[in-house]
Amino acid sequence: MKELSIITQAVCDLAREVGKFQLEQQNLLKTSDVTEKSPNQLVSYVDQESESRLIHRLQQLLPEAGFITEEKTVADSMSEWFWIIDPLDGTTNYIHHLPIFSISIGLVHHQEVVAGVIYDPSQDECFSASKNNGAFLNGKRINVSDKINLKDTLVATGFPYYDFSKTEGYLDMFRQLMCSTRGIRRLGSAAIDLAYVACGRFDAFWEYGL
């Protein structure tokens, strides 16, 4: 078993390769290439091909590991070790040519997440972390915000897009935070939102039904 830090760096390198493919394909994508898995959940050949490429290389990196994947290009398998993959978080942004989408990969051992990588191809920013080794952005250590007072914070959220059962409660919270913080942002990729919390750009993030 390789050291987690070595595995994490290899996953960063892989995410960059797949991210380059996504950027190359973004201007080639046609409306006919996009289908709807369920209401407001879009998918294209780019999502599926990205996932296949990730799986192929991750199998070589850690042959004993199973997979839980977004696009189900391989059967789910929760073994001692397994990967959790979202090959393109922010597909709606992607197909509308908004430069906010990401590749998200986590490694789980005995039900504990021990490593993770979030890569933003548009900004060439790779967020990575592994157990007992800290968290990094492009190799530089990062930390969460040290803000104490809500009035000094910038917070992020994700809008509900298929489960609207808690909309009123969500809007109540939105109103409260709109009035008590420096502002609210909604980027469209929860993985990037969480990475931005990890590096202190956002002070907090909330979303229900994620």
Image (spheres, grey):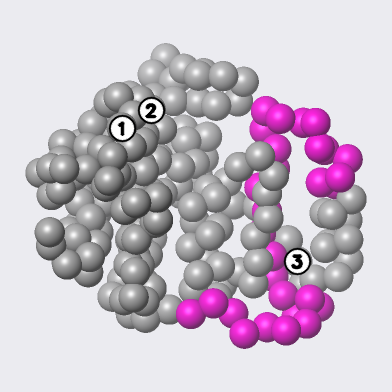
- For badge 2, the amino acid type reads Glu
Left or right: 111, with 79 as reference point: right
Relative image position of residue 155 (x, y in whole percent): 69, 65
The residue under the point 68% across, 83% down is 147
From the image, tell me which residue sits under label 3. 183
Q: Relative to 106, is 150 above or below? A: below
Relative image position of residue 39 (x, y in whole percent): 62, 20
Left or right: 144, with 86 as reference point: right
- For badge 1, the amino acid type reads Ser
N-terminal of the pair, mark 1 or mark 3, is: 1
Q: Which label lies toward us, 2 or 1?
A: 1
Q: Quadrant of residue 13?
A: bottom left
Relative image position of residue 134 (x, y in whole percent): 36, 76
Q: How far separated are the C-alphas under marks 1 and 3?
A: 41 Å
From the image, tell me which residue sits under label 1. 77
Left or right: 192, with 128 as reference point: right
- Extent of the magenta region: 143-171
Q: How far separated are the C-alphas under marks 2 and 1?
A: 14 Å
The residue under the point 33% across, 60% down is 115
Label 3: element kind: strand
From the image, tell me which residue sits under label 2. 71
Residue 49 marker? none
The reply to whether the magenta stretch includes residue 78 is no
